[in-house]
């Protein structure tokens, strides 16, 4: 079984970008932790990041045939993208939404998520640890 972990715009800058909000962990650190946990849990990991909405949509389409679950931090597209919601609606397995920061504690425009209309679960405000929590849950849903 395989889990796709998708990351949206600006998350390539984790560790450098607003560390007071997002912390000092880099995306490469998150990927390494997820791969290690994946080995422990017995799930394969596909790990992706893109700043381009269309590329994220293409990867969700690919997941239809390649993965049993999706973990997605859509970043700013969370609050804007009907197209990512539609792509996730074409995916059959569990979808878990992750936000590093507690979006509900922040600006009003971050309180609404299109992706939450599809997500089976949402983690926000647990820092980068949220990815590992989501991965454990995804594994428990597909194994
Ligand atoms: C984020 C929260 C979003 O509102 C923001 O646009 C991001 C990151 C988070 O992980 O906390 O880029 O998804």
Image (cartoon, rainbow, N blue to C red):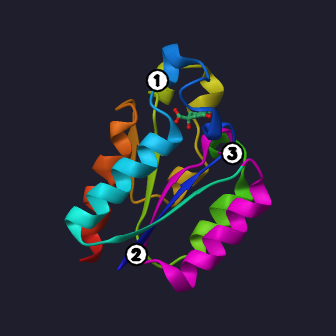
Secondary element at image label 1:
loop
Q: Position of residue 80 (x, y in %)?
A: 72, 44
Q: Please give the name of the residue rendered at 76% of the width and 55% of the height, measured from the top-left corner.
A: 53
Q: Is residue 112 left or right of residue 39?
A: right
Query: Who comes first in sequence, dot 2 or dot 3?
Result: 2
The residue lying toward the viewer, choosing from 28 and 141, is: 28
Q: Main secondary structure of the magenta part?
A: helix
Specify whether residue 140 is in view: no
Binning the other alpha carbons within 10 Å of mark 2 as few (below 14), some (14 to 19) or many (20 upward) gives: many
Which of the marked residues, 1 or 2, is nearer the chain's N terminus?
A: 2
Q: Which residue is mark 2?
A: 2
Residue drawn at (56%, 76%) of the image:
63
Q: Magenta includes 23? A: no
Q: What residue is pinned by disc 3?
A: 77
Q: Nearer the viewer, mark 1 or mark 2?
A: 1
Q: Which residue is mark 1?
A: 24
Seen in the picture, residue 39 relative to 27 is either above or below; the reply is below
Marks 2 and 3, how far apart in space?
Answer: 24 Å
Q: Is residue 61 magenta?
A: yes
Q: Residue at x 61, y 39 (%)?
A: 11
């Amino acid at each position: 079984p395989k889990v796709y972990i998708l990351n949206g715009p600006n998350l390539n800058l984790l560790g450098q970008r607003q560390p007071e909000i997002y912390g000092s962990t880099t995306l490469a650190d998150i990927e390494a932790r997820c791969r290690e946990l994946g080995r422990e849990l017995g799930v394969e990991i596909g790990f992706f990041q893109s700043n381009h909405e269309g590329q994220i949509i293409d990867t969700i389409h690919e997941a239809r045939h390649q993965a049993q679950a999706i973990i997605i931090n859509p970043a700013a597209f969370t609050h804007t993208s009907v197209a990512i919601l539609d792509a996730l609606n074409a995916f059959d397995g569990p979808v878990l939404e992750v936000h590093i920061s507690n979006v509900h504690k922040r600006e009003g425009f971050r309180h609404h998520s299109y992706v939450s209309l599809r997500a089976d679960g949402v983690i926000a405000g647990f820092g980068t640890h949220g990815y590992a929590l989501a991965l454990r849950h995804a594994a428990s849903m597909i194994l």
